[in-house]
Amino acid sequence: MDAVTSERLKALFETKLNSAMRVYLDTCARCGLCIESCHVYASMPEARYTAVGRAEVVRKIFKRYFRVQGKFAPWLGEVLEFDDDTLRRLNEAAFSCTGCRRCMVHCPFGIDTQLIMGIAKALLVGADQEPKILSMLSDMSIMKGSTIEETRADYTTALANLEGDVKALWPDTTKKPDGSPYPAIPYGVKGAKVLYVALSGAHSVVPAAAIMNAAGESWTVSSFEAVNFGAFLGDTKRMKAIAQRIIDEAKSLGVREVAIVECGTAYRVLRHMMGPQLFDVVAFVELIDRYVSQGRIRLDSTKIEGKVTYHDPCQIARNGGIYEEPRRVIRALTPNFVELTPTREENWCCGGGGGLISMGEEEFRMKSSKVKADQLAASGAQMVTTACENCHSQLSDLSRHYELGMKVEFLSGLVARALVR
Ligand code: SF4
Ligand code: SF4
């Protein structure tokens, strides 16, 4: 690697060195308490797949360029210079980590490996060595923000084509102030209370629309997809640009609340990483729970056969604090709910986060999530439900790959099919 690139990466690293990060990089006692926490290590026991092993790659670069010994006596060891092998190691560390933060729960110092891997990802972007699929998808999302007018007509046609499917689940729509009906999927409604941000695909629009219509919600659907590829990429600038499109839309419509589709990362970015907003941000499962708790929707609790378990998406549960809401909803759906073991904060990551699903690779995802497959099988449930698109895809792949014979369902889909008048 040439000296100019190396200096550029060093400067980039320095921009990430806030006080929390310096503590994380200086404090690790190598106690090893985080080792067993990682689903990758639990499934593939190699040192490079431990939280501390991953962080050491970044920590050794930190020591080389920002600590006295590394600057003046790097030959004393425990340091890494920027070169092709270091970039390879950064890539391996960052993209074998789903950012689930289960390790952080067990670290006595609360060291945040996801944040440390954020540096690894940023350095890869700076060296133009990031997974290109993630940067391409990020750029497409950002571009959509600036070309929305050109695609608006096609989008409204696509929404209109889904109206029949929504009405099959719930025939009534909400009403305008003059008493006339809104379409089953209202779009561009100024002054609506809730802006619902979906993903691409009818499965993320139709059940949610039926549920909100059944609850008599004042809502409107977003022009944008919730997914934030910039967060998977570890590029803060692109992550913020993608989230900002939704913030700008919410402000221009004057909504009071933004409800994020079942997508853990999109929720975490908008709720916890974009600073305070003029509107509230909720995960869609919180909205469903509110409707059930307030009696705004009623659910048939006889529709689901067999035992049902729930997978807590890491970005919604451990990293978002949403544990009780989905459980209340599931108990309204079935008397046969069983918890996974371990559960809640200790739940094993599905193994598909951090961009791994979007990157398309499957072999590592399946091998590194064997512990998740074992956990699902041990529950004895015939169905697992969840509230995150990534988790849904990964759990479906796991059920097929490990022949678990388990149905995988979005919570919103189960609720929409159980709506009763
Ligand atoms: S954040 Fe999750 S995947 Fe990454 S090292 Fe920690 S436990 Fe492993
Ligand atoms: S538990 Fe914390 S202090 Fe101990 S090795 Fe892991 S990251 Fe370091």
Image: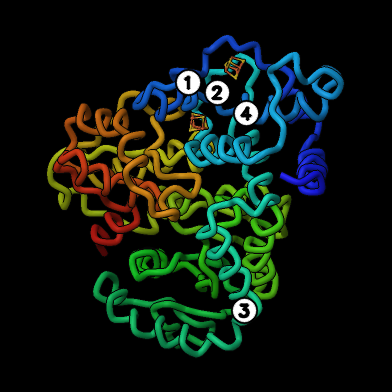
The mark lying in front, picked from 3 and 4, is: 4
Could you tell me how far apart the alpha carbons at marks 1 and 3 are, in whole angstroms?
54 Å
Give yes or no for contact between labels 2 and 4 (Cβ–Cβ under 8 Å): yes
Q: Is residue 365 above or below residue 19?
A: below
Which amino acid does the dot numbered 4 rest on? Val
Which residue is under mark 4?
A: 57
Quadrant assignment for the N terminus = top right
Q: Is mark 4 within 8 Å of ligand 1?
A: no
Residue 53, numbered label:
2
Could you tell me how far apart the alpha carbons at marks 2 and 3 are, in whole angstroms?
50 Å
Q: How many neighbours does mark 3 have within 10 angstroms: few (below 14), some (14-19), or many (20 or more)?
A: some
Which amino acid does the dot numbered 3 rest on? Lys
The local secondary structure at tag 3 comes to loop
Give yes or no for contact between labels 2 and 3 (Cβ–Cβ under 8 Å): no
Q: How many neighbours does mark 1 have within 10 angstroms: few (below 14), some (14-19), or many (20 or more)?
A: few
The mark lying in front, picked from 1 and 3, is: 1
Give yes or no for contact between labels 2 and 1 (Cβ–Cβ under 8 Å): yes
First along the sequence among labels 3 and 4:
4
Could you tell me how far apart the alpha carbons at marks 4 and 1 are, in whole angstroms?
12 Å
Give the image location of residue 115, x and y in percent.
Answer: 64, 36
Which residue is under mark 3?
A: 190
Give the left or right position of residue 320, taking residue 237 as reference.
left
Task: Say which of 257 and 79 sits in front.
Answer: 79
Q: Is residue 322 above or below residue 222?
A: above
Residue 47, numbered label:
1
Could you tell me how far apart the alpha carbons at marks 2 and 4 are, in whole angstroms?
7 Å
Task: Tell me which corner region of the image, top left, top right, bottom left or bottom right, holds residue 341.
Answer: top left
Q: How many neighbours does mark 4 have within 10 angstroms: few (below 14), some (14-19), or many (20 or more)?
A: many
